[in-house]
Image (spheres, rainbow, N blue to C red):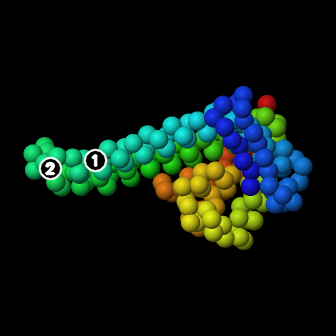
Amino acid sequence: MRIATRRNPEHASVAATAGLLQLLGPQELAAVMAHELAHIKNRDTLIMTVTATIAGAISMLANFALFSGDNRNNPLGIAGVLLLMVVGPLAAALVQMAISRGREYEADRMGAEICGRPMWLASALEKMQISAGQIDNVPAERNPATAHMFIINPLHARQMDSLFSTHPSTANRIARLREIAAEEKDR
C-alpha cells in the first residue's frame, strides 16, 4: 500500500508500507511514488473530498425531501419523492466513482511522465494486483468507502471495470500505460 495525504502540494506526504517495499523492485517503487506525486500535484485528495461532500449533500437533500412537510402537496408526489431518494444518492455515487476512476488514469499518465518509464508502473500494478488477489483485505471489505485510497481496488469486485468501482481495472490501466510507452518509442 502507498499513501498520499493532504489537500495541497505544500503540505503533502507520501509513504509506502513494508509490504510494498518487499513486493516491488526499486524502479517499480519509483513509478508508484511518481503516481502518488501525480495525485498530489493534481490535488486529487481535495477533488475527492469536495466530490464526496457534494455526493453526501445530494444524498441528504434527497432524504430531507421525504421528511419535509406535507408530501401530498409536493408536485412530485410521494412516488416522485421516493424515486428522488433512490436515484439522487445513486447518481451522486456514480459520479463520485467515475471521477475517482478518471483521477487514477490521470495519475498513471502523469506518474509515467514523472518517472519517464510507463512500463515500470505497469509492472508495479501487475505485481500489486496479483498480490491483492491473494489476500482478502477484511478492513477494506468492511468499509468500501476507503477503496479509493488504494492504488489497486482492494474489493472483491476488482476484476471488472464497472460503474460501481472506484478504480479502473488493472488490465485497462496497464493497456493505457503500454500505449504511452509505445508513443514514447515512436518519438
Say few, some or many: other residues with alpha carbon within 10 Å of mark 2 (under 14 / 14 to 19 / 20 or more): some
As shown in the figure, which amino acid type bears the numbered disc 1?
A: Phe
Q: As rendered, which of 35 and 79 lies closer to the eye? A: 79
Say which quadrant the N terminus sits in.
bottom right
Drawn side of residue 93 relative to residue 158, left or right: left
Q: CA distance from mark 1 to mark 2?
A: 11 Å
Drawn side of residue 143 relative to residue 11, left or right: left
- Of callouts 1 and 2, which one flags the residue occurring earlier in the amino acid sequence? 1
Q: Residue at x 69, y 41 (%)?
A: 5
Q: Residue at x 79, y 31 (%)?
A: 187
| Image spot of residue 174 (x, y percent) | 70, 51
| Image spot of residue 136 (x, y percent) | 66, 70
| Image spot of residue 6 (x, y percent) | 66, 37
As shown in the figure, which amino acid type bears the numbered disc 2?
A: Asn
Q: As rendered, which of 72 and 147 lies closer to the eye? A: 72
Query: In which quarter of the view is residue 4 placed?
Result: top right
State the residue position of label 2.
71
Question: Residue pushed farthest left?
Answer: 73
Circles 1, 2 touching at the beta carbon (< 8 Å): no
State the residue position of label 1.
64
